[in-house]
Amino acid sequence: MTEYSAIEMMICVAARELENGSTVGVGTGAPCAAAMLAQKTTAKDLSILFEAGGISPQLPEMPISVGDSRTFYKAAMAGSMGDTMEACSRGFVDYTFLGGAQIDKYGNLNSTIIGKEHRHPKVRLPGSGGANDFASFCWRTMIMTVQDKRRFVEKLDFMTTPGWINGDDSREKSGLPLNTGPYKIITNLALMDFEPKSKRMRVISIHPGYTFNDVQDNCGFELLCAETAEKTHPPSMGELKILREEVDPYRYVIGR
Amino acid sequence: MNVLEQGHGKLFMDPDPDNAREFFRKKKRKMDNKVMDLKTAVEKFVNDGDYLAIGGFGANRTPVSACHEIVRQGRKNMGFAGHTSTHDMEILSAGKVYNRIDVAYVVGLEARGLSTCSRQYLESGHVEITEWSNYSLTARLKAAAMGVPYIPVRNLMGTDTLKYSAAKIADCPFTGKKLTLMPALYPDIAIIHVHEADIYGNARFKGIAVSDIDLANAAKRVIITTERLISHDEITRDPSSTRIPYYVVDAVCEEPFGAYPGTMPYEYFSDEEHLKEWLEVEKDSEKFQVFLKKNIYDCKDHEEYISRNGGAKKRRELRAKEMLL
């Protein structure tokens, strides 16, 4: 059997979710690796958009910043933040990939503070960046994160970025663009979606070597489990070869 | 328009377009020679207490030399637009230059990690913080550039980011949908680094614009730092390349490698080793003070800073890296 790491598994699972011919707004790191892997495997015509204005580049290597020169290398356009975010706001962007320090059962994210007091937090984090914008505007939000009880919490310290907010129809009622919202969560243990009515996080596929109990034990809230939950296909030799040799040869992401 | 909800964050700047118009009415329209050295430009146009916005994107086409000069001159009590501010914020935090900040992206240096210095400064309680997102600040600058008090957008709704912002949610008079109203942001001073500018301030840059065109138009005063001065004839031969027009600009400073240690597209890539050194040395406050003395306070200008960190050899390496050689 092929050896692979947790992050390689996550990147391969994420890449498989991206449809050919679609558009995706990404940041640096694992999401960008997933989009690049998708372009080299199942979604040759996937267009990548970066929030600083890079539109559909042919990434020569992993960018360090979402605004560095790689993000518009051989691009269709070196635009502006308005160009990218307004394309999202108009409904042109199908997917986005986000992460965060905390996530709750409705896929809401915190990347602002750890601690209860905004003025005196335990830890100050970067804030929204483009996350709130992408999650508000893109059709389908995907979240890639390592899973543990510290990250998967019953209540966020701060809701930076909207998921399904309080579940049911609360997102729609909030006024955010219709028919947008969290779509899939990709962790080191499982693939999740959201139960359509309650909008609660639901396990739909468990990665090899783990059980539902493992997934639940590493989560601070009660997870739903789809009746049809299956085993995730491990990364193939082909996916791993491209990921290691072409996408991230310097191991910026997969070496972490 | 019926306001349904509003953030209780502080609105640091007046969004009234008529007040801004009165300021712009008095601004000189004449094509004057605005070339001066950076020290003079910062002395003349960057004041204690002003609200500052930095162009570029964190460590990409950022006027780093100007950030150093602001710290060297000891500016204090400034407002700051944290619009994907990464290395620029790290420098300004080291000098404790600002005491209020509009946050979109702060503290981090993206994939490189978090800045201890910026983080601790924001955690200290000495800085007033209003939360936004990147596009929120883009929209606020766009509103100011349009000369209107706000523009409606569709983000922030349902989140704590809205609660800690100074945005308002209102019903749309046409569709009945909820809209987030982003108040215009007219910074007192914007500093933008470009590839080429003439002596009047007509400026060109290559690659992504981020929000710099709106920023230049929204700001009351603008300092352009440029890799190269070019002739006015060259500008007029190709006016479609001008991204920032002369009349918004107050000072033009020729600062080759002015974005170092950040990236300048098509010119040089970021000095990752040196940026890592910053992040590392910040963890020890004594070592950090020695580092700042060496790299900012004891340098007379950016040229000296670069020469202390590899000089011509480093420049060649970073140029080669940018060209993917």
Image (cartoon, coloured by chain):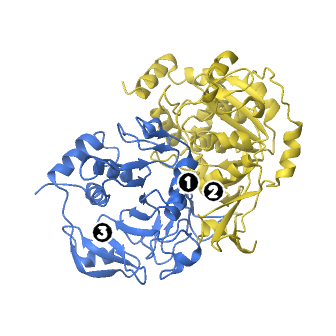
Chain colours: A blue, B yellow
Of the numbered discs in the image, which one, if any, rests on residue B136?
A: 2
**Residue named by callout 3:** A191
Q: Amino acid at mark 1?
A: Glu
Query: Is the residue under label 1 in contact with that under label 3 (CB below 8 Å)?
Result: no
Crowdedness near tag 3: few (<14), some (14–19) or many (≥20) residues, C-alpha within 10 Å: many
Q: Are marks 2 and 3 on the same chain?
A: no
From the image, state whether disc 2 or disc 3 is nearer to you: 2
Q: Chain of mark 1?
A: A
**Considering the numbered disc 2 on the image, is that residue within a helix, a strand or a loop?**
helix
From the image, state whether disc 1 or disc 2 is nearer to you: 1
* Residue farthest left in this picture: A1
**Residue named by callout 1:** A86
Q: Are marks 1 and 2 on the same chain?
A: no
Residue in the image at 81% along x and 45% along y:
B49
Is residue B107 shown left or right of residue A68? right
Q: From where the camera sits, is residue B115 visible?
A: no
Residue in the image at 64% along x and 26% along y:
B239
B179 or A14, nearer to the observer:
B179
Q: Are marks 3 and 1 on the same chain?
A: yes
**Picture layout, residue B221 above or below residue B51:** above
From the image, state whether disc 3 or disc 1 is nearer to you: 1
Image position, residue B110 (x, y; %): 49, 47
Image position, residue A31 (x, y; %): 38, 53
Is residue B197 shown left or right of residue A233? right
